[in-house]
Amino acid sequence: MKKIPPTPSDSQNPSTDNTVDLPKLSQITERRVSARLRNPGQPDPVSHLFTIVPKADTESLLCHACETLASLNVMTTDLAGELEGSRRNVALAIQQLAVLAELLVNRALDNLDLPGGLPEAPSNSPR
């Protein structure tokens, strides 16, 4: 099989490459985050793409969050199985955070199910 060497225009002109200017991206992100923190009442311009029904009840929101986190758990576990080394460790760390968040959401759902919505008292508390 004949090997075709790259043309000089392909390898010597990085400006046509699809690279991201990280410092510029960081500045843009910092401005948006800072503006959002200064004025929390201002709608996030990105949030107009996906919206949540304004009158959604807390239990429904938590149920959907729990299902989303469970899906994230499965996806990251599958991904980690295909990776090696430090990339696998990163995927497993993301998976552990998803599991932790899922546990927190499940506890919030349990608290909503209690009579009056009161938090559960610890059963082994010392007196």
Image (cartoon, helix red, strand yellow):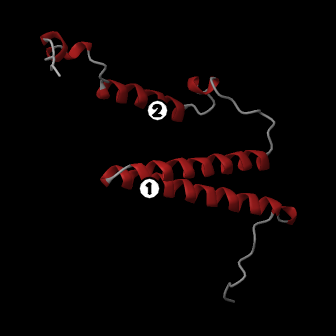
Which residue is painted at 82% across and 61% down in the image? 113
Which residue is painted at 13% across and 17% down in the image? 5
Q: Nearer the viewer, mark 1 or mark 2?
A: 1
Amino acid carrying mark 2 in the image: Ser
Residue at the outermost right position: 115
- Secondary element at image label 2: helix
Which residue corresponds to mark 2?
34
In the rendered view, tell whether residue 57 sits above or below residue 27.
Answer: below
In the rendered view, tell whether residue 96 sits above or below residue 14.
Answer: below
In the rendered view, tell whether residue 24 sits above or below residue 121.
Answer: above
* Residue 75 place in picture, x, y as percent: 53, 47
Q: CA distance from mark 1 to mark 2?
A: 31 Å
Q: Relative to the observer, which residue lies in front, 62 or 13?
A: 13
Label 2 crowding class (10 Å Cα cut-off): few <14, some 14-19, many 20+? Answer: few
Amino acid carrying mark 1 in the image: Leu
Which residue corresponds to mark 1?
92
- Secondary element at image label 1: helix
In the rendered view, tell whether residue 74 sits above or below residue 17.
Answer: below
Taking the image as shown, residue 81 lies to the left or right of residue 114, namely left
* Residue 121 place in picture, x, y as percent: 74, 75
The total number of labels drawn is 2
- Which of disc 2 and disc 1 is earlier in sequence? 2
